[in-house]
Image (spheres, rainbow, N blue to C red):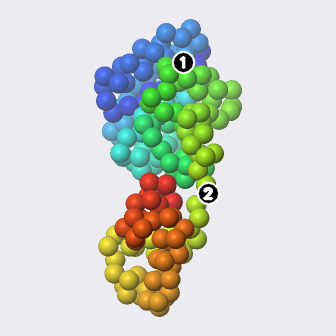
């Protein structure tokens, strides 16, 4: 039997996923959690093969939980469920602890397929997410441009950005011009929006 820990904040959604997985002869949901601090302890207690984790706006918290889970239970594979992602964010998730990522809009049998694939030691990426990643270009911004854009997005004035990054104000303005050109934005605000939606910052 494939032992699954199911983590989802919304009780109704968690129940639906549990019922879906329970229909399979080779899958058993051995524990459920709402993600509020008890995930790792439940996993250590029930030792699942796969942890299916619903990701909401608290993605940073859940990734931190995933890191602790992998440290204490390295044999447990992590499948993240999320409504949407960006190519850059998808790469970061897979580079960190996730063995698989699936859309919450995916057909039910895709979740079952993903769980089985992870148990066989393979990765699973929802085809919709994979196609979006293939269609999107790589991050065109340099690491320095990303630093400048992050500070700009926080509302930091050009002169202060220059001081923080040990640059001249003219160099910061040059970086912002290059960022606007590379993102295809019409303004700095537009460049911030495009880069954020693309997962580049």
Foreground pick, 87 / 41: 87
On screen, residue 25 above or below 199: above
Q: Residue at x 45, y 15 (%)?
A: 20
Q: Which mark is residue 138?
A: 2
Q: Which mark is residue 109?
A: 1
**Residue 6, position in %: x, y?**
44, 27
User: Could you tell me if residue 75 is visible in this image?
Assistant: no
Which quadrant of the structure image shows residue 112? top right
**Quarter placement of the N terminus:** top right
User: Could you tell me if residue 188 is visible in this image?
Assistant: yes
Q: Is residue 45 left or right of residue 133?
A: left
Instruction: Judge depth for marks 1 and 2 and give the one in front.
Output: 2
Q: Is residue 44 left or right of residue 95?
A: left
On screen, residue 86 above or below 183: above
Q: Residues within 10 Å of mark 2 (few under 14, many from 20)?
A: few
**Residue 30, position in %: x, y?**
47, 20
Foreground pick, 90 / 55: 90
Q: Which mark is residue 89?
A: none
Q: Looking at this rendering, what residue extends furthest in the front direction?
A: 186
Which quadrant of the structure image shows residue 14? top left
Q: Looking at this rendering, what residue extends furthest in the right direction?
A: 121
**Residue 29, position in %: x, y?**
47, 19
Secondary structure beneath disc 1?
A: helix
Q: Residue at x 37, y 36 (%)?
A: 35
Which of the two discs, 1 and 2, labels the residue nearer the N terminus? 1
**Residue 170, position in %: x, y?**
47, 89
Q: Residue at x 30, y 25 (%)?
A: 11
Secondary structure beneath disc 2?
A: loop
């Amino acid at each position: 039997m494939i032992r699954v820990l199911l983590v989802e904040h919304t009780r109704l959604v968690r129940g639906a996923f549990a019922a879906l997985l329970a229909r399979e002869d080779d899958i058993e949901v051995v524990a459920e959690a709402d993600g509020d601090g008890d995930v790792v302890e439940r996993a250590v207690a029930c030792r699942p093969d796969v942890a299916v984790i619903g990701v909401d706006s608290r993605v940073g918290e859940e990734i931190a939980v995933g890191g602790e889970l992998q440290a204490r239970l390295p044999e447990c594979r992590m499948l993240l469920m999320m409504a949407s992602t960006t190519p850059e964010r998808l790469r970061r998730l897979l580079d960190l602890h996730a063995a698989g990522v699936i859309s919450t809009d995916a057909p039910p049998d895709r979740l079952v397929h993903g769980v089985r694939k992870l148990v066989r030691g393979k990765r699973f990426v929802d085809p919709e997410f994979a196609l979006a990643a293939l269609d999107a270009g790589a991050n065109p911004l340099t690491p320095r441009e990303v630093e400048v854009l992050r500070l700009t997005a926080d509302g930091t004035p050009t002169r202060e950005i220059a001081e923080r990054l040990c640059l001249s104000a003219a160099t910061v303005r040059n970086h912002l011009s290059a960022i606007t050109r590379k993102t295809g934005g019409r303004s700095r605000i537009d460049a911030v929006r495009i880069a954020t939606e693309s997962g580049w910052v």
